[in-house]
Image (cartoon, coloured by chain):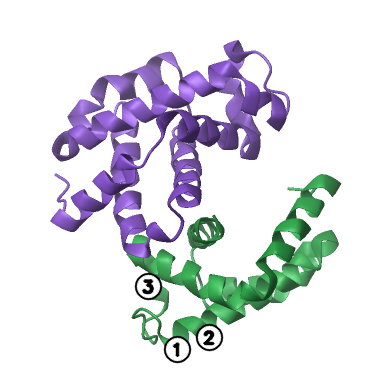
Amino acid sequence: MVQWKAEERAAIQAVFAKLDYESVGRETLTRLLVVYPWTRRYFGGFGNLFNSEAIMANPKVAAHGIVVLRGLEMALKNMDDIKNTYASLSELHSEKLQVDPGNFQLLGDCLTVVIATRMRTEFTPDIQAAWQKFLAVVVSALRKQYN
Amino acid sequence: MVLSAEDKANVKAAWDKIGGHGAEYGAEALERMFVSFPTTKTYFPHFDLSHGSAQIQGHGKKVAEALATAASHLDDLPSALSALSDLHAHKLRVDPVNFKLLSHCLLVTLA
């Protein structure tokens, strides 16, 4: 089981406290789809994803950004048992959506970059470290049901 | 992987924004990497890795200089960086997954 130090919990709470789900969610997903274009394969029903302007303006992308952050919030609220909290999400992504799990890492990286632009120097190396650990646990939990 | 003309323009624009801060950002990226991804410290047992250490500053400068070389040789990156690649592969024997970790931390620093 993952052990969290008090400072790590505090750091992760601090990051979430400042998150504007709408703005951060939209920008994170936009970056994923622009920087790693193969990820568009998972969003066939989203309409126009042909260039960065279209993606940025796409309302389905914006809506889905919020869905993703709400999903992460579940992990925040259950930090001591992320693995079980994510069991059905993992199954969804592997069985139904058939997402290559390498992409979870990429999404996490894009989110981290957006958070850094929002929090700037407040996103200290120590806070980043706690955040990266949180993301690693989340990604690992999402990979659990793949076989 | 090939860089398009637009890619090269974007890289140049980003590099210009960095201005003279390359060494400072290089050092910060290294520090972030050592703190977030402690396994990377195993390649620097001979370094003082505490915050603000002279060795991290010095190494940040080296990283920045290498990036400057890369940024000015976008049309022939493989040959411009071939000596560095040899160094990291044959002498330092760094697992290439770590390059992604440093570049991620560089992105976070720039962000």
Q: CA distance from mark 2 to mark 1?
A: 6 Å
In percent of width and height, residue A36 lies at 61, 37
In the rendered structure, which amino acid carries the disc numbered 2?
Gly
Chain letter belonging to callout 2:
B
Dot 3: what SS? Answer: helix
Q: Residues within 10 Å of mark 1 (few under 14, many from 20)?
A: some
Residues A130 and A84: in front is: A130
Q: CA distance from mark 1 to mark 3?
A: 16 Å
Q: Which chain is green?
A: B
User: Which mark lies nearer to you, 2 or 3?
Assistant: 2
Chain letter belonging to callout 1:
B
Q: Which residue is mark 3?
A: B41
Q: Residue at x 50, y 56 (%)?
A: B108
Res. A52 image quadrant: top right
Q: CA distance from mark 2 to mark 3?
A: 16 Å
Asked if disc 2 and disc 1 are in contact, CB closer than 8 Å, the reply is yes
Horizontal side of residue B28 vs B65, given as left or right: left
Chain letter belonging to callout 3:
B
Q: Residue at x 53, y 81 (%)?
A: B59
Asked if disc 2 and disc 3 are in contact, CB closer than 8 Å, the reply is no
Dot 1: what SS? Answer: helix
Residues B108 and B38: in front is: B108
In percent of width and height, residue A77 lies at 19, 33
Q: Which chain is purple?
A: A
Quadrant in the picture for the C terminus of chain A: top left
